[in-house]
Amino acid sequence: MSDVKFKNIVSDILNEGAAYAKYFKPKELKFSDKIRGYCEENLCGHYGTNWMCPPAVGPIEELKEKIMKFRNGVVFQTITEVRDMRDKEGLAKARDLHNDFLRKISKFLSEKYEEIDIFPMGAGHCEICERCAYLDREKCRHPEIILPSAEAYGIDLGDLLKCCGLKFNYSEHSVAYVSLILW
């Protein structure tokens, strides 16, 4: 894929509504057992509850191998106003809006650039089903729309943002969610 298309993909993401977007090479990603460890500490309460969170998503080394097969990526942010950073309902709604945006832009890019295989990575745990099939030892009911998170894969988003000249853009009344699109 030409440099022009890389720039077009970043522009497409920005034009569709992302606050920031930058191109990167997946080989630049840093993987961290510490990041994955936050999942295992279950601070969010979703460890072992769905197919996209550990341990179901797989061992970090296998996930790293999967990511390293991609040659290109874009990291982007959406920023949403919230009442304050303690507003759990507002934060969850902002995350859901972000992941809906990721699904929409991934579909758009897949249709526009048919020659590339898009792999989107969302924010936070999977929120598709009220009760995940994982808990019932069944296959995922919606494999076409699930989104793994970068953190579940052990990706250090803080380092990636820094390398791309970006930062987590949040304040007392706004939250930024970050996603990756690889191809």
Image: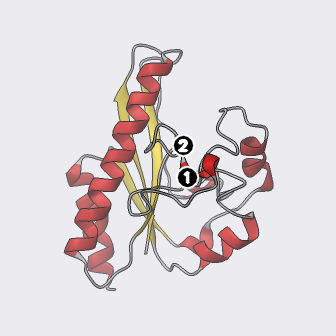
Residue to which mark 1 is pinned: 149
Three-letter amino acid code of the residue under disc 2: Gly
Disc 1: CA contacts within 10 A as few (<14), some (14-19) or many (>=20): many
Residue to which mark 2 is pinned: 124
- Residue 57 percent location from the top left of the image: 64, 59
Drawn side of residue 161 relative to residue 22, left or right = right
Which image quarter holds the C terminus? bottom left
Question: Residue 167, relative to residue 84: is it above or below?
Answer: below
Disc 2: CA contacts within 10 A as few (<14), some (14-19) or many (>=20): many
Three-letter amino acid code of the residue under disc 1: Ser
Question: Residue 155, relative to residue 85: is it above or below?
Answer: below
Counting the numbered discs, the total is 2
Drawn side of residue 55 relative to residue 17, left or right = right
- Residue 62 percent location from the top left of the image: 71, 72
Q: In which quarter of the image is residue 78?
A: top left
Q: What element carries label 1?
A: loop
Of the pair 158 and 95, the residue shown nearer to us: 95
Of the pair 174 and 104, the residue shown nearer to us: 104
Q: Is mark 2 on a helix, strand or loop?
A: loop
- Residue 114 percent location from the top left of the image: 25, 81
Residue at 41% across / 21% down in the picture? 90
Say which label, 2 or 1, has the lower sequence index.
Answer: 2
Residue at 64% across / 38% down in the picture? 46
Q: In which quarter of the image is residue 89?
A: top left
